[in-house]
Image (cartoon, rainbow, N blue to C red):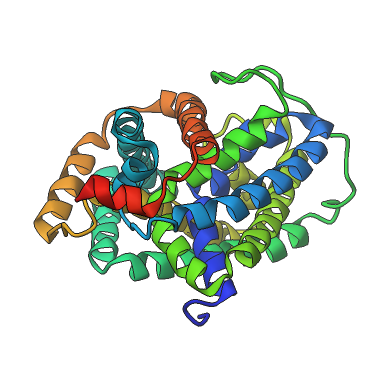
Amino acid sequence: MFPEGSVLHATFAVLGTMVGAGFASGQEMIRFFARFGNQMYFMIILNTIICSFVLIFMLPRLAYFKQTCWKLRNELHFGKPFSTYLNLITQCMFWMMNLTMVSAAGALMNQQWHIPRWFGALLFILISCWIVSKGLSAILSASSIISIGFVIFLGLVIPYLSTSLFSFPTWQTITAMDDVLDPNLLIHPLIYTSLNIGLSQSVLTPLAIKLNQSNKHYKTALLVSLILNVLIMLTCQALQLLGTTQWHHEMPLLLFVKNHGQFISLVYELIVLGELLTTFLCGLFSILKSKSAQQKRTNNEIFIIGSILFGCSFIPLPWIVSYLYPIAGICCMVWLIAVFVIPLPKLSDTLDDTS
């Protein structure tokens, strides 16, 4: 759709990794932004600044070692004592995230289209494994297409459905949420940015290497941040118009869309399913890239990982919605701070260590 290596291609590829199922369903927007009422205006501005700064600073550092394997890159940067624990936590988060995506995809197809849950989960895994087997370029292409569709949907459909969308009503505040986050306004945008970048580091790292070669990382970072925060504003406005009494729903944004016809609801359901797919692709690729970049995974190994996730997808996981995002976000924030604080070693030193 866009020339490979262009700013727009990179922008929507990054958006495809950062805007996932939690965003599309409305759950992330409630948990990190909308529940703070009128104070969310300040939080969106703060998130724009944090996201822009982090991406501008982060992308060149991810490309520094020219190492596409996220695990080996962390070892070169942080050293083995610290990186061993950090990589273990990250690996667990990838498995938890993928398990959640498979379970959610099966539940979505069962609830909305009356497809058996096991068949929906199986179909979801088969499509995902096929895309991952084609390599990183196929993952980025799928993420770009889905993110473009999501941007068009939120940018055109949501304002069309809401004549009072930009009337800036008095937003209602929800202070009681069943998560482990302290209700501190300043920490939520940082955790949200850390969560998105930390969980997509395996895809962002090789993409950052390409961007660094053409010196387009700063343009991509600013454009990603601008589009992302416009989407956050649109989604939160729609959720506020929906009413806080319906925020407990698994897909609160679906309730807003469902009142405007079956076709629009179907388009939205497909977009959410697509965002589940992009998040799962990123997590599956991360698991496969847990060893050296030179060691390629076979299709049999992809099949084994997919089978394990399918077998575990029937475990009830209602608590993950409440605890996965905050815990994973805090862990990713530790990783993000470490990337900022720990200086990059000289490349000659890392070569000596690995030789």
Between residues 299 and 121, which one lies in front from this camera angle?
299
Between residues 242 and 80, which one lies in front from this camera angle?
80
Task: Determine the residue positioned at 41% across, 66% down.
Answer: 140
Between residues 271 and 218, which one lies in front from this camera angle?
218
Task: Determine the residue positioned at 13% across, 60% down.
Answer: 299
Between residues 224 and 87, which one lies in front from this camera angle?
87
Task: Determine the residue positioned at 17% across, 40% down.
Answer: 308
Eyeballing the image, is 85 above or below 263?
Answer: above
Q: Quadrant of residue 337?
A: top right
Q: Is residue 320 visible?
A: yes
- Give the side of residue 190 with respect to residue 348, left or right: right
Eyeballing the image, is 92 above or below 70?
Answer: above
Q: Quadrant of residue 134?
A: bottom left
Residue 307 in percent (x, y) is at 16, 45
Task: Determine the residue positioned at 88% across, 34% down.
Answer: 170
Residue 324 in percent (x, y) is at 44, 29
Residue 346 in percent (x, y) is at 41, 50
Residue 127 in percent (x, y) is at 28, 61
